Amino acid sequence: MQSYLSLALRESEIATEAIREELARRGRAAVVAVADAHGDLISLVRLDGAPVASILIAANKAWTAARERTPTRAIGQAVRDAETGFDIAYYGDPRYVGWGGGVPVVIGGSVVGSVAVSGLPELEDMELAEIGVAAITAQG
């Protein structure tokens, strides 16, 4: 029998609230998704004014970051690499996302889930997702 650590609803709430506070401070809106260690959604919140298309993108960013145990931007950069990109081109699964904004949560050396943000420019999505991850990891 195997056991593993995974984010739960409480950690999802902590990350989402930290991101919501920062979005409010900036006067911005986005979609926030938090996934467990397998990439399955724990929560998804679309703030008023966030693009509808960002719902699926945020969910897929969270799934990708947890499944691949790496930030989604790194996957996108690898796919766009002229020498290796076509060898790993999204593994044939449409849920894989290569835009920045999906970040794995690592605790004790293990990926326990992910936080993702979508709806803003890529670098801002990435920054906000990192705020969510930092809020979780600060809980110890």
Image: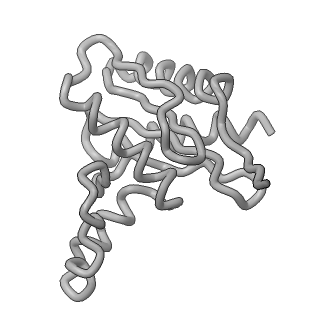
Q: Is residue 137 above or below residue 91?
A: above
Residue toward you, 138 or 12: 12
Quadrant, the N terminus? bottom right
Q: Position of residue 83 (x, y in %)?
A: 23, 88
Farthest residue to the front: give it. 1
Residue sitting at 53 percent across and 44 percent down? 114
Residue toward you, 94 or 61: 94
Residue sitting at 49 percent across and 45 percent down? 39
Q: How many marks?
A: 0
Q: Is residue 1 above or below residue 76?
A: above
Compared across the picture, whether 19 is left or right of 126 comes to right
Q: Position of residue 59 (x, y in %)?
A: 37, 36
Residue sitting at 42 percent across and 16 percent down? 24
Farthest residue to the top: give it. 48
- Residue 75, image quadrant: bottom left
Compared across the picture, whether 120 is left or right of 130 comes to left
Q: Is residue 127 above or below residue 41?
A: below
Residue sitting at 39 percent across and 65 percent down? 74
Q: Is residue 33 above or below residue 84?
A: above
Quadrant, the C terminus? top right
Compared across the picture, whether 31 is left or right of 133 comes to left
Query: Colour scheme in the image?
Result: one colour
Q: Position of residue 41 (x, y in %)?
A: 48, 33
Q: Position of residue 29 (x, y in %)?
A: 31, 21
- Residue 33, image quadrant: top left
